[in-house]
Every structure is written in structure tokens, then in C-alpha cells.
Amino acid sequence: MANSTKIPKDSLPVNRVRNFQLFDQEVCLNIQRNTFPASRLHTDFAREIRKPNSIYLVAYFEHCYEELDETIKLNNYLCECKTNAKNVSGFIGGWNVVDEIQIIDFIVEEKFRGHGIGRLLLNSLIELACSVKSKLITLEVRASNMPAINLYTKFGFKVCGSRKNYYSDKNEDALLMDLEIN
Ligand SMILES: CC(C)(COP(=O)(O)OP(=O)(O)OC[C@H]1O[C@@H](n2cnc3c(N)ncnc32)[C@H](O)[C@@H]1OP(=O)(O)O)[C@@H](O)C(=O)NCCC(=O)NCCS
């Protein structure tokens, strides 16, 4: 199970977003494995980011942090974040097909959730979608995944369909959501 030590609000260093680099794959794979330990399906990030139509972004802390524990120790020195996967806190990824972007991966490391990193990543993806003149962003989400559904709804995503029993582990429906971009 992932380290889920709660971190007080406003106690994290500044977050930024950049393109996913090959050296991010190990950290992101760990985040994915920790989030979905029962799943055998993991993203081949190296393959994904080489696809010409893929869009992958990572959120990273501007300042280095030591391993966060209950006492939350933050390092004060600025590190080379842009060439370092150590500070990655989450990622979002999708495919840009014609004028639509389909979100296929979106995770914030468990211990960093609830601090606006998901919002930052989604906002960055939407900005990117605007810049490449996408007309629609689509995704699938478990019907019970309220944190994600709330987040998408806040950004204006609407439920546009469902897939019955799409998630076979719990026979759970997938909601299809989309956001039209004007
Ligand atoms: C969904 C996810 C990416 C959100 O990331 P996050 O960094 O925790 O989200 P943020 O802190 O930016 O929260 C943004 C909004 O999301 C919603 N939200 C986040 N966590 C929530 C929770 N536990 N319960 C209800 N709503 C929540 C709220 O609307 C929140 O806005 P607010 O802060 O104004 O209340 C994160 O929960 C996650 O990685 N989940 C596991 C993987 C997953 O389910 N991915 C989505 C697949 S479709």
C-alpha cells in the first residue's frame, strides 16, 4: 500500500508542470503501481511518449524535498528539477487524435493528493489542448471515483455516456465524460 501520511495544506513546495521525459518513467510507474496495486496493466511510458500523438505531462516540486514523513522536512535548495525525476508528484497523459484528446492516465501520488496538483495537471492539459486547437477532451472514469469526477466536473466536464460493468474487478460502470473546447 502507498505511503498515505497526511500532509497539512499549504506545506508543499511550489509545483510546476513540464513534459514527461524518459527518465520520469520509473517514478511514474511506481506511482501507478502504488495507486493500482491489483492491476497487472501498467503503462509502457517509454513507448507512449514516443508516439507522435501522445501528450504526457508531469507535475514536479520546484524545490527538492527529503523523504516526507510525519514531521515533513523540506529541503531549501533549488535542485535541477527539470532534469530530475525525484520531485515528480503526479502525471497526466493522453492521445491527441485529430481534434480530440483522450485522457488515458492521470494520477497524483497518494501522499500529495488534496493539494491542488491534480487541478494543476488537468489545467495544463486543457491549456495544451487549446494550444493545439483540440475541440474535445474525453475520458473514462469509475462511477465511484468521486475525487476524479468532482475534479472533472469543476473543469466543466459533462457525463456523456457510460459503459456497463466496464471494470471487471468490481463489475463497475465507467462514466464517459467530455469537455468541449471553444
Ligand atoms: C483524481 C486525482 C488525480 C486528483 O488529484 P488531487 O491532486 O488530489 O486533486 P486536487 O487536490 O487538485 O483537487 C481538485 C479537486 O478535485 C476534487 N477532489 C480531490 N480530492 C477529492 C476527494 N478526496 N473527495 C472529493 N473530491 C475531491 C475536489 O473537487 C477538488 O477541489 P477542491 O480542492 O476545491 O475541493 C487523485 O485523487 C488521484 O490520483 N486518484 C487516483 C487515480 C485516479 O483515480 N485518477 C483518475 C482516473 S480517471
Image: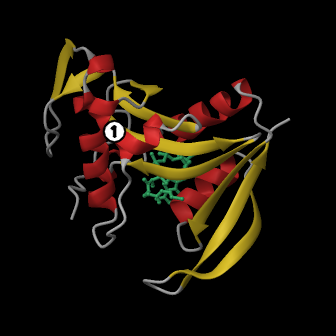
Q: Is residue 140 above or below residue 77?
A: below
Image location of residue 174, percent across then percent down = 61, 73
- The answer, for residue 111, to whether it is visible in the render is no
Q: Is residue 108 left or right of residue 139?
A: left
Q: In which quarter of the image is the C terminus?
A: top right
Can you identify the residue that label 1 sits on? 89
Q: Is residue 127 placed above or below 158 in the rendered structure?
A: above
Quadrant in the rendering for residue 100: top right
Which percent across, then down, holds residue 50? 45, 35
Foreground residue among 2 and 96: 96
Residue at 46%, 85% (x, y): give it: 170
Q: Which amino acid does label 1 sit on?
A: Ser
Position of 50 with respect to 81 (left or right) is right
Q: Residue furthest right?
A: 182
- Residue located 25% across and 14% down the image: 80
Quadrant (top left, top right, bottom left, bottom right) of the N terminus:
bottom left
In the rendered image, the vertical position of residue 64 relative to residue 168, given as above or below: above
